[in-house]
Every structure is written in structure tokens, then in C-alpha cells.
Amino acid sequence: MSKEILTFIRNRVSQPALTEPAPQDNEWQEILEAASRAADHGNLKPWRYRIYEGEGRAKLGEIYWQHALSEVAALPESKKDSFIKKAYRAPAVLLIYAHIQDHPKVPAIEQIMATSAAAQQVLLGLNALGYGGMWRSGPACFTQKTKDLLELDSNDQIVGLIYVGTAKEQAKPSPDPMLADRLEWVRD
């Protein structure tokens, strides 16, 4: 295995400040095809992708607002714009979710993990093409109300929203992962 690949993976960082451009359609196709090679017990391909760009992001912003209202009913209407603007933090937003299938040997959690692996590979693919990404989730990703607003099936599970664009500035390197504190060798 090439050490350059390991260095590439080690140097990937999340990019919270994103601007134009985002990937073109052909680049998205390339990224998502590569991401779809994620580990996948049973070859179920549970991952699903939906890209929001341009004014399509307003639908996400409305979902943020509706979720906030369901949590705090007394939110003043004047706060709505701040929730809508969250969907415009990047020129594109990728919704990635698992379409969970009944399977005798592949439980739902494995299908969600496979979709999460695909999401990580999206981040690597974005980085390989010179783009930045920020994987976000939060309470709104895990409610039936959000699934209803996104017109997802009851057997779908959101794993996150990846905000995508070009990094506004050079990201700071990630701190040392302190692997020694998180690794145990079992040899005997």
C-alpha cells in the first residue's frame, strides 16, 4: 500500500467554512461511485444520496425551522431566517441516509454502519478533488418529523448532512489522535 494514501487519509480535516465552487455533476458522480464501494455486508447497498444546491437548500432550511418549532413552540417568527440560513452555509449539502432492508443476516445497524462508511468515503473523495466537507448531524436528523418533511420512508435512517464546497481558508491540521490511549494489543 502506498504511504501517500495513508498520509492523504491522515491529513483530511473537516472544513466548516465553505464557499463556491461545489462539485460539478460529473464530479459528484465520480465521488459517489467511489463512496459506494464502502464495506457492505450482504451487498445491500443501503446508502442513498440527495444533493441540495442553489435554492433547493431552502427546503433544508425550512426543515431546520420546523424542527426548532417542534422543540420550542414559542419561537418568534423573527428567528426563522436564522434557521433557514443554516442550509446556506455551503454551496451544496449532501443528505446521506440508509435505506434499511429486512435481511436475515444483515441487521439494521450494519446497514447504517455501511452508510456511515460511505459518508466517510464521500469526505475522502471530496478532498481528493480539492473540495472541502463538513459532516453534520444533530437532533433534527433523527426525528420522524424530519423524515416526513424530507419524504423519506419509515425504514430510512439519516446518517448526516455533508456540507460541501471549497474551503475558504487552509484548515488547521488535526491534533495528534493519541492512539496509544485508544489501542490495546491482544497477542497471547
Image (cartoon, rainbow, N blue to C red):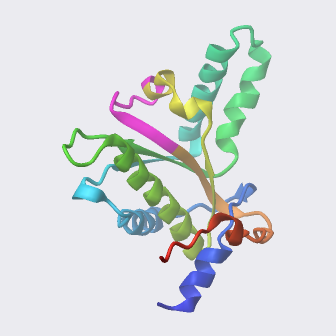
Q: Residue at x 68, y 61 (%)?
A: 14
Work out whether residue 183 can be spotted.
yes
The residue lying furthest to the left in this view is 104
Q: Residue at x 45, y 67 (%)?
A: 31
Q: Which residues are magenta?
A: 148-159
Total tally of numbered discs in the picture: 0
Q: Position of residue 163 (x, y in %)?
A: 61, 51
Q: Nearer the viewer, residue 138 or 169?
A: 138
Q: Position of residue 89 (x, y in %)?
A: 70, 46
Q: Residue at x 48, y 65 (%)?
A: 121
The quadrant holding residue 84 is top right
Does the magenta-highlighted stretch encompass residue 103?
A: no
Work out whether residue 129 can be spotted.
no
Q: Name above or below for residue 42 compared with residue 155.
A: below
Q: Position of residue 45 (x, y in %)?
A: 29, 54
Left or right of 22 on screen, residue 50: left
Q: Name above or below for residue 55 compared with residue 120.
A: above
Q: Position of residue 155 (x, y in %)?
A: 33, 32
The quadrant holding residue 150 is top left
